[in-house]
Image: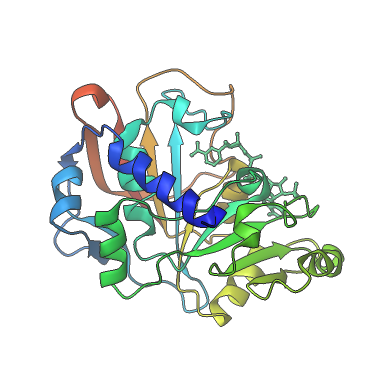
Amino acid sequence: MSGFVTYCEDREKQTVAARMSGFYTVQDAPADSPVLAIGNTWSRRWFDGDFYRSDTAHPEILVTSLVFVQSKEGNTVAPDPSTLGGGETDKHLVYEGLSRIDADGVMAGAATARSERMVFSIWHPELVALRLERGHSRHPAQIVVTGRGDVPIESGLMFNEPSLRVFVITRSGMAGALRQRVGDRAWVEVIDAGEPVSLKTAMRELRQRGMRVISCVGGRTLATAMLREHLITDLYLTTSPIEAGEPNTPFYEGPPLTLTQMVEKAGKGDEAGVRFEHLVVR
Ligand SMILES: NC(=O)c1ccc[n+]([C@@H]2O[C@H](COP(=O)([O-])OP(=O)(O)OC[C@H]3O[C@@H](n4cnc5c(N)ncnc54)[C@H](OP(=O)(O)O)[C@@H]3O)[C@@H](O)[C@H]2O)c1
């Protein structure tokens, strides 16, 4: 059996075995909100209602969400982000689930995507079914942003699985060297996004390749750049009730953001104190 098949089976098993407590609704999206509802009977039970995403964006900009978990004091960096205390519902239902149902691609900075065994996808069978019902491929495209080209093309799982579509976004001066490393992996494409990388250019190039909805999963370096370039439409932010993570590592540093809260959920049972917010970025 291929390494990728085993990886997918393991991820599915872990997700199905996860002990989620579920969320309850503190605030739901107003009825006339310009958002699209996503959900099935199973997800509505755990999420306590529909999940939403922006439906329209500027014609040149994709519908791009940013998904983050932060500790009580707003830290986001930890070797294993699950130690930040967001809980299993956030991880399996939101992060590796509802936020990716419609995603044509999942986008990450090189530090977040550097692990040898990493594929950004959806794993719970109920959520996989929802994604397929909505007409999407089994796995979203993998989109990695790098300036220095420090990505494990030769050995990383996502770069060596022909059934995936992979985009490596880099600066002009690095594109040639990366294309050489990619070699005959026809499923991996290097996108030259200018010198230095312009994420606006990158998003335009992704749009030309059929991408419409992107889930950006950070880390904070990429998130800050995306927000500063006004490329994020929705922010899915989970705040844990515990102090954790590396100090002074907020998901964003820059001019104040204009955020409108669309949805607020709270954790139940073992996950009491966890707060999930869907914020629309203006
Ligand atoms: N709390 C959460 O939800 C969450 C989410 C994701 C990650 N994390 C954690 O955050 C940490 C990583 O944080 P990070 O800020 O270092 O991660 P990151 O944004 O994933 O990666 C930073 C790297 O991505 C590339 N990059 C990002 N923006 C770029 C741009 N505009 N232009 C060119 N290259 C760009 C660069 O790669 P090169 O160095 O190759 O040039 C840069 O060094 C890890 O501990 C991870 O576990 C937490």
Compared with 276, 214 (above or below) is below
The residue under the point 45% across, 17% down is 243
Please tell me which residue lies in front, 127 or 219: 127
Quadrant of res 36? bottom left
- Quarter occupied by the C terminus: bottom left
Percent x, y of residue 34: 26, 67
Image position of 15 (left or right of 210): left
Quadrant of res 213? bottom left
Image position of 136 (left or right of 208): left
Residue at the top extreme, as displayed: 243
Percent x, y of residue 223: 56, 48
Please tell me which residue lies in front, 40 or 192: 40
Quadrant of res 2? bottom right
Percent x, y of residue 192: 75, 71
Please tell me which residue lies in front, 103 or 152: 152
The residue under the point 45% across, 31% down is 82
| Ligand 1 placement by image quarter | top right
Residue at the front extreme, as displayed: 1
Compared with 266, 72 (above or below) is above
Percent x, y of residue 29: 20, 54
The residue under the point 17% across, 65% down is 32
Please tell me which residue lies in front, 147 or 254: 147
